[in-house]
Image (spheres, rainbow, N blue to C red):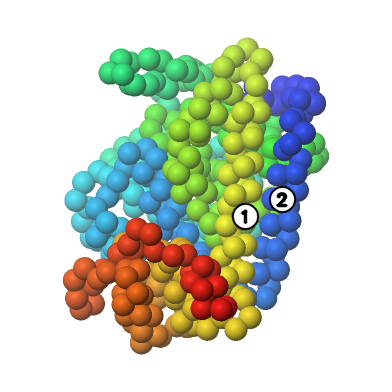
Amino acid sequence: MKSFIDLRATLARQPPRLGARLARIDTGRGREQMYRDQIPELLLGLAEQTRVASITASNAIEGVVVESDRVEKLVRAEPSRFRNRNEREFAGYRDAIDGLMRQEEPEAISIALILHLHRQLLGHVDGGGGQLKTDQNLIVSYRGGERTVLFTPTSPEETPFALGELVERYTAAATSEEAHPVILIGLFVLDFLAIHPVADGNGRLARLVTSHLLNSQGYGIARYVSLEQRVLDTKDAYYQALLDSQRSWHEATHDPWPWLEYLVQVVADCYSLFEQRMAGAASAGASKQERVRGFVLDQARPEFRIADIRRALPGVSDQTIRLVLSALRDEGAIVSTGGGPGARWRRLAGASPASSQAQNRGG
């Protein structure tokens, strides 16, 4: 809530270069709606691919990693038993993000919604979900083998009031359109992470809230490109931006713009990637084989299965998929590891992007 105390003064310090990036985001939102109206079937496949990437990446940021052969089963909610805590936490993020994405009309942000998401996030882990913290938590670094306190969040006693005030101030600012929606969302997330309202899972909870608030304001990009993956790819910049913007937060003299510039760039990058993928998939004359080729070379994880392609490209037959995989293998772009229904494919380093290969073939 500290970022909203003197919002006009904060907004007056907006770096001029941010205006073009925000305009870029708004252009992307318009094209997102166009694609949703014109080629919804392509968005369905992209959404499923993004779901897997988001669940995997948001957990990986916090060091929660599961074996690659378990990812697909956990995403599909198949295992009746979990092998370890990491799998339980992985499944919790799946439940939370699925619940958000199923909402036809996004629910207004509230403490109740935040705690509901936290309850889902830790739903497969014993205790702790859906409650505000009762002990002081710290943001620390262990770099160089030494423990250093980087930031002390709001105390447990002050947390209920601080979080409630943050929700109220954000809602009022968003309703009166006091600033660009993405700027207000960024300020909310910055304060949320400074409060650090729960004992475990604050980072993952903040990323869920970010996606939800963007969707609530009409920016549905989190459905089609993984913001979490982009954060994972730029993790050092993510933590540095937060650290820079949280200095003097308790005194309300902090500078939110390092964090806001980071978040705006992430959202803008995601819209750029979204448009590249959609333009490639929807280009005139793009056959089903070209769509499979493009997915394997540009979008699939480095190691994948036919089932991943099937989910991402509904309406493309297994026969077509296998035909393209065989051709790519002959070209030296991918290799198979195993056989039968459980066969895995791995993209080789240096494989040319689909767009480059299309140019090489004259298309």
Q: Would you name the residue on which mark 1 appears? A: 271
x and y percent of residue 116 in the render? 48, 44
Q: Crowding near pointer 2: few (<14 within 10 Å), some, many (20+)?
A: some
Decide: is 152 above or below 186: above
> Residue at (28%, 40%) from the top-left corner?
126
| Quarter placement of the N terminus | top right
SS for tag 2?
helix
Choose between 42 and 290: the one closer to the eye. 290
Q: Which disc number belongs to residue 5? A: none
In three-dimensional space, the C-alpha distance between marks 2 and 1, rounded to whole angstroms, equals 8 Å
Lateral position of residue 5 relative to residue 44, left or right: right
x and y percent of residue 255 in the render? 65, 21
Whether pointer 2 and pointer 1 mark residues with C-beta atoms closer than 8 Å, the reply is: yes
x and y percent of residue 16 in the render? 77, 33
Q: Evaluate whether residue 283 shows in this view.
A: yes
Decide: is 308 above or below 25: below
Amino acid under disc 1: Tyr
> Residue at (50%, 33%) from the top-left corner?
237
Choose between 209 and 112: the one closer to the eye. 209
Amino acid under disc 2: Arg
Lateral position of residue 360 relative to residue 104, left or right: left
Decide: is 37 above or below 70: below
x and y percent of residue 216 in the render? 65, 51
Q: Which disc number belongs to residue 24? A: 2
Image quadrant assignment for residue 94 = bottom left
| Quarter placement of the C terminus | bottom right
Q: Crowding near pointer 1: few (<14 within 10 Å), some, many (20+)?
A: many
Decide: is 266 above or below 314: above
Lateral position of residue 325 relative to residue 226, left or right: left
